[in-house]
Amino acid sequence: MSKERDRAPLSTEISPPKSEVDLTPSVCWASGVEVERVHASVDAPAGDRLAIGQTISGRYRIERELGEGGMGVVYLATDEQVVGETFAIKVLKEPLRPEALSVMREEVRKTRKLSHPNIVDVHSVNVDGQRLYVLMEYLEGKSLDALLAQEFGRGMPFSHAWPIFRDVGAALGNAHDHNVIHSDLKPANVFMTTSGRTKLLDFGIARVSRGPLLQAPSGPRALTPAYASCEMLEGKEADRRDDIYSFACVIYQMLCGERPFGDVDALEARESGGRVQPLGVLTRGQNAALARALAFDRSRRTSSVEELLQELAAETYLVLDKLWASRHSVLVESAGPEAQRTVSPVASAVVFNPSPHSIAVLPLVNLSGDKEQEYFSDGLTEELLNSLSRINELQVAARTSSFYFKGKDVDLPTIAHKLNVASVLEGSVRRSGNKIRITAQLNNAVTGFHLWSQTYDRDLTDVLKLQTEIATAVASALKVTLLGDEAARIELGGTRNPAAFDAYLRATKAYLAYKNREEVQAATAGYAEAIRLDPNYALAYAARSIVLLTIARNYTNRAVVAATDREAMVDARMAIALAPDLGLGHAALAGAFEGALDFASAAQEYDRAIALDPGNSWILPYYGHFAVCMGHTDAGLKALRRAVALDPLNEFRHRTLGLGLILARRYDEALRVLGNARALAPHDPYALWNMGFAHYALGNYQAACGFCEQTDQRHPITLLFLAITYDKLGRRADAEVILSKFRALRGDAASAAYVWLYAQWGQTNRALDELEGAIRLRDPYLVQLRMSVLTDPLRNEPRFQAIERELKFPSN
């Protein structure tokens, strides 16, 4: 990945003005921090505020005041020389003194080497008359202290808090590697952006404030007592272990809503014999790790950020990021004595042996000056990635794995090794209206040699042609023979209508990020708008069909499910009518047939889809799962393994392979694969359910129960598994109670589930009655009927065999 612009992180946090305290949850903030124990100089001109509309240095127009801290006032400013550029400008309260500028610029020089995606950036230190000001990155979002106060007063769940720990740890670790100490880490200095990234603030100013610039000669140091170590409070020279103490204070507060020692500082707590109270949300080992980081004596304190995070992560199946993964080998640990089969290397521990024609497409950097255009740069990356995946000779890393590195300070060799690819395509996109400029660069990740680069200026109406040009150039640089039909497929199903393309990209972004039914429905509406603008947009029809199938699988009303399935079928057929060779269209139609229990037709469409688009990482897992369910285990597992190879950092791919292995009754291998899925997403309930399922099939009922009990006890799948497992453990009364809860949630909508349950309870006739009902309701989960171990007790029953014949499973 090419180096970032030469910018240094140097900033302070601010408190918002009173008029902005109660804004909506996404508040616009600047980089800054409220510094305690710092007294403004009596020489500071009173009321010396900048006016709205005023221009500073003849270039930066003040738009509004963002807030005020102990050292300065921060404003939002626009750059009148570069359209669309916005900055936070911190105007220091102290009057300009001769040494001030040199001290500040020296601090910039020292901290410039800290450029990091989790550290707020500074652009320059400037003088305007008697004003000294810092031009900084402008952030939108909310500080951690505000987040805790407004939403998590009693603490965050560990799963919510861990990504913040990880990002702050990455920032601190980077600073410590460069011998830079933060010295004032606290929740107000941790900022959560609206894009989901955590930024650490106040690198630089806290240190400058101890010098002649912002501290009276007899004044105390700039620090926050509640988060400061004993050594800092005693005035000793800062050490990285002081940052670790502060970091541990923040971690403790995030998890329970309270500081480790309440309202007293470290010195007072030490004097009174204070002890850190263990937290119920942590294991014994994790509490011990946190207590070591909070040791009063520096010599007894955890020595590095990496060590602290490793100890906190050791029992939570977390994949450690580049911050510490480059220094330590990590294993996925087992859940207990019954689960020793799950020990496995993390997914990133893949032998590096890339195909010469393998490539990863990194997210194009949005240079439009408008964060709202992020969907466009991401969507364009996705379309380019899909275009390349249609070239048969190319092995293209899938979207989830490529986008895993977005915004992370990771070099090309590391990316190549994690994704097992020989080359990496990166670039940027700048959009202005319907005009776009794309710069693309291809690098050999093995040798480090630059292979090809090009800049394209195009109108949005030529976006299809542009995708073809880039894909063809990449293929040529990699010495790939591009056949005529492949060149035609690159543009297959697209549009030349800029507004339709824009609606399609917005809908795709909504669908890929969805967390609830409403967001999925918003994606459907977006694809509908794309179709309205271009009725011949085949890809939009295929995409809407897939989203409709997603909606159908999440409804309990069978009438709604049936109607939605019919709409999905119509859209899929329309996509194929417009673009007969569109693999995604045939995959969507296969899914619709699968939902209708027309397995023979679904098999034909899946075969057609995989033949047309064998490198499509979306089609592969669905085709693979279906093939295994039909008894074609070799072909299905081959497709599922290829999906994992193309998308190694996507937990969904690993857990789908794990489920395929369970259906193929390869339980030990399934547990190893599901261990990788859980390493990538420690709290993913699907991985836990499938691990429980595998242990159940092996007869390890206690272990199976343990995995299911780690998931949400209100979720229907948890209830189903527990009802089945409790019965095997002799807890029939508990199983009956769980079944009643399941029935209250799902009613008749989960008819196939009752088949599995009653079959395992030994109530054969009841199970067969439910199976006949499931056939009438066209329950899509009957696709697993042929291979599931749960239906084994029914296989010799004549009624079951008649139903199997009725479903017309394809022959083996």
Image (spheres, helix red, strand yellow):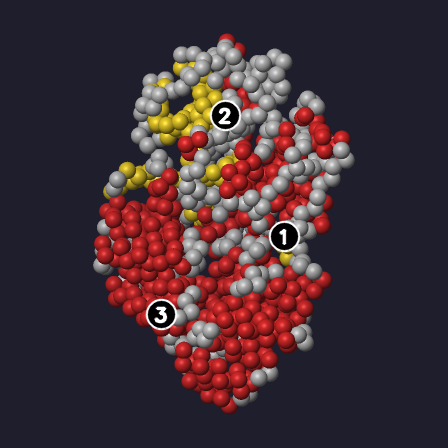
Tell me the mark number nearer the camera, choosing from 1 and 3: 3
The residue that label 2 is drawn on is 69
Q: Residues within 10 Å of mark 1 (few under 14, many from 20)?
A: many
Vertical placement of 401 versus 264: above or below? Answer: below
Q: Position of residue 103 (x, y in %)?
A: 54, 16
Q: Earlier in the sequence, mark 1 or mark 2?
A: 2
**Res 532 → quadrant:** bottom left
220 or 125: nearer the eye?
220
- What residue is rendered at 61% in x and 26% in y? 223
Residue corresponding to mark 3? 560
Q: Amino acid at mark 2?
A: Gly
Distance Cα–Cα, label 1 vs label 3: 39 Å
Q: Residue at horizontal 66%, vertical 37%?
A: 262
* Amino acid found under the numbered disc labelled 1: Thr
Residue 47: which disc?
none
In this rendering, which labeled residue sits more in front, label 3 or label 2?
2
The quadrant where residue 137 appears = top left
Q: Depth check: give the residue in front, 473 or 746.
A: 746
Q: Nearer the viewer, mark 1 or mark 2?
A: 2
Tags 1 and 3 in contact by the CB under 8 Å rule?
no
Using a 10 Å C-alpha cutoff, classify the residue at mark 3 as few (fewer than 14 neighbours), some (14 to 19) or many (20 or more).
Answer: few
Residue 457 is situated, as x and y percent measured from the top left of the image, at 28, 39
Q: Is 114 placed above or below 49 here?
A: below
Q: CA distance from mark 3 to mark 2?
A: 55 Å
Residue that extends furthest to the top in the rendered view of this protein: 98
Q: Earlier in the sequence, mark 3 or mark 2?
A: 2
**Judging from the image, what secondary structure is the residue with disc 2 in?**
loop
Q: Residue at x 28, y 38 (%)?
A: 432
Q: Give x and y (percent) for residue 635.
A: 48, 70
**Residue position for label 1:** 316
Tell me how far mark 1 sits from mark 2, CA to CA.
38 Å
